Amino acid sequence: MAEDTTASVIPLHQAPPKRKARTSSARAKANRRRKRQAVKPAAPMEEDSSASATLIPPEFSSVDLGLTEATVTPLPRATTQASLPVARPRRRISALLLSTAALALAGVGITMNGWFARSLGSNDIAGWLFLAVGVAADLVALVMPTCAAALWQARQRVTALVAWSFWAMTFVFAVTAGIGFASLNIADATMMRASRVTPAVASAQAALNDAMAARDRECRNGVGRFCREREATVNERRQALDAAMKSVEQSADPQTEAAVRIVGWISRGALRPTGDDFAMLRLVLLALLPQIGGILLMVGRSTR
């Protein structure tokens, strides 16, 4: 029986099978599936990094790790400081100026109170002891506000209140010493200016001397009509001298007189303070201002 040697012929290019036409419901399902895939959030970077790590060969992991560490290194400090606002240096300048003013006022207050405290001593030892007390009190009044504020911020309220009480005592002591220093020196300066001899005082004094010499000549032989006239002339010349000296005393403190006139001019006569009022105000300010160095130092440190 003869074998069948016929070979089957297979075409090289086979035509793809025809797709079946999708129905409307199948197309709608496919569209919904694509929308869900588009709306689905991206996977976290950690998962991506872990997935990519499994795909990287081990021999390249060390190189990539070095690059990762290099990229994570923080920015230099100069870059972060350059991004700070410009107002920071201005605040530092203000704090520096306040601290300088506080130290200057403290130096003046220590000198004033130390000098006055030493003047109270009856001898040298007592004077130096009073000086030590005055300087120590001023130093406590200078440093204590800053320490008390720091304790209050640290929530140590009882210790802070104790510190403020000690500051109040030293502050009152320093103010009283400042009042003594200011009043003593102002009184001495006023008396020196009041006792100066002006041309008006000199002429009034010469006229009084002439009147007294004439009275003595007329009244030598007894009291008569001319003697009484010379006595009246002496009285008139003495009153003129007193008026000239009083005008000098009034001009010995021109600050208070000018302040009285300025206040009356500004208020159009509604306020009429006296020279003594301004003298007391000046005394209080001169005694108080040198003692606020501690408050200024506290404010200056808090604005940094």
Image: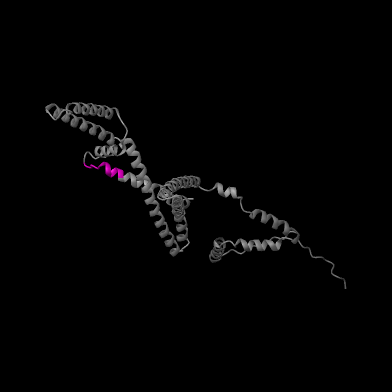
List x then y, in percent, for residue 126.
44, 52
32 falls in the magenta region: no
Left/right placement of residue 193 relative to residue 41 reads left
Left/right placement of residue 239 relative to residue 189 reads left
List x then y, in percent, for residue 90.
48, 45
Q: Quadrant of residue 207?
A: top left
Numbered label tally: 0
In this picture, is 255 found above or below 54?
A: above
Q: Nearer the viewer, residue 57 or 223?
A: 223
List x then y, in percent, for residue 51.
66, 63
Q: Residue at x 63, y 63 (%)?
A: 47
Q: Quadrant of residue 237?
A: top left
Q: Nearer the viewer, residue 271 or 52?
A: 271
From the image, which quarter does the N terminus lie in? bottom right
Q: Is residue 17 visible?
A: no
Span highlighted in magenta in the image: 270-279
* Residue lying at the far bottom of the rendered structure: 1
Q: Nearer the viewer, residue 134 or 241?
A: 241
Q: Is residue 67 visible?
A: yes
